[in-house]
Amino acid sequence: MSAAREPAYLLLEDGTRFDGLAAGAPGPVTGEVVFNTAMTGYQEALTDPSYRGQIITYTYPMVGNYGVAEAFMESEQPHARAVVMREVAPSGSPTAQGDWEAWLAEQGVPGITGVDTRALVRHIRDKGAMRGGIFGGDVPQPEARERVEAEPSMSGQDLAREVTPQSPVVFDEGDGPLVVAIDTGIKRSIIDNLRARGVRLELHPCGTPATDLLARDPDFFFLANGPGDPAALDYVVANVRELIGKKPVFGICLGHQLLCRAIGLDTYKLPFGHRGANHPVKDLATGKIDITAQNHGFAVQTPDGSGRITGDEPVRWQTDFGAAELSHVNLYDYTVEGLVLRDVPGATVQYHPEAGPGPHDALYLFDRFLDLAERSA
């Protein structure tokens, strides 16, 4: 590390402090401190709208060693507020279009390096994700503590309005079905996977009324990923309820949570969330296990209120829209990972089949969604 770096520290809301050195753009900055367990994909994570309002701790010890490139962007700009690293590494890749740390500075993203990230991650696993901030070494800790305590909790935050487009975005080059998406923070990888299958895609602001969405007469509706607390998006949930049963509805991540809330389930905040590229998920109907990429801090409550699926069969119950099944389970903590509607066409997954980056085990789900929409036509 450069001897010219300035001292910096990360302060958590419970008073725990981690010292290091400043990197990227100048601070201070506050947000919810979370961790990502993927070995690659630092740029994808930073530009994923689902990380809005958060400070990402990378568990891989060296970050930046293959640089940055336009191909790794999941949106037009970074959405996470800052990054925490064990060691920031210069790029050694001939395919890099820029240096990671220089790019952080250009994008206005503060960072801290030299942190004992293993200790930090263990602390978050024990105590839960919490508010925190990155500060220069000259900032008195009482002042930093005040700034951290002024940061709103992630619970109750509607961050979808900050990342949704202001007007519809249309991709009409394909000759396949028309897909209308409620864009609560869609990733570029999801757009690319849908367009690669020939669909005509429209991304609509998350507050678009159901009547306007239905007027587009799509082949199916898509509920995107995104940031924040799904319980703060009741206006989206109300619109989703108007779509169910009229056309097929599919969702990923936040979209999964919103469809589940629309049929009457609750959501709750996980202690430290699921963020990484190595989560085993079991399809309860087939017994097949996929290794999946995940990025969410909230989960869907089960009908019995336990928050866990403990059996080997799909959990079935009756809703306002007929029979529904919780179809997938996370084998780390047995939380809900998927939903299937049995009497009207609809399905979701909590994980990211596009896995940008991550394993490709679940890519078939895009084809499954398209096949179900075609059979429902």
Image (cartoon, rainbow, N blue to C red):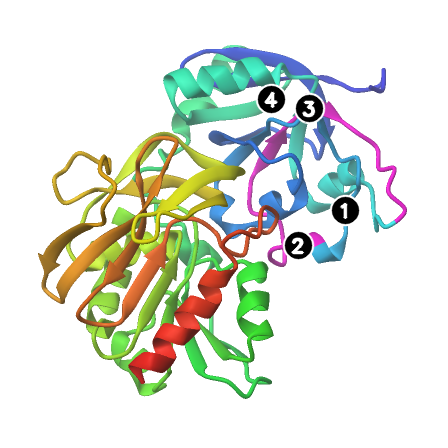
Q: Give the CA distance from mark 4 to mark 1.
A: 25 Å
Q: Give the CA distance from mark 1 to mark 2.
A: 9 Å
Q: Name the residue at 15% across, 53% down.
A: 316
Q: Amino acid at mark 2?
A: Met
Residue 135 bears which disc, if any?
4
Q: Amino acid at mark 3?
A: Pro
Left or right side of 150 for 115: right
Question: Is residue 93 within the magenta segment?
Answer: yes
Span of residues in magenta:
72-94
Residue 23 bears which disc, if any?
none
Q: Give the CA distance from mark 3 to mark 2.
A: 22 Å
Tag 1's secondary structure?
A: loop
Q: Residues within 10 Å of mark 1 (few under 14, many from 20)?
A: many
Q: Are marks 1 and 2 in contact (CB under 8 Å)?
A: no
Frontmost residue, 30 versus 256: 256
Mark sitting earlier along the chain (1/3): 3
Q: Amino acid at mark 1?
A: Val
Question: Is residue 87 within the magenta segment?
Answer: yes
Q: Residues within 10 Å of mark 2 (few under 14, many from 20)?
A: many
In the rendered image, residue 231, in percent from the top left (x then y), is placed at 25, 48
Residue receiving disc 1:
68
Number of residue marks: 4
Residue 61 bears which disc, if any?
3
Q: For residue 235, what is the image quadrant?
A: bottom left
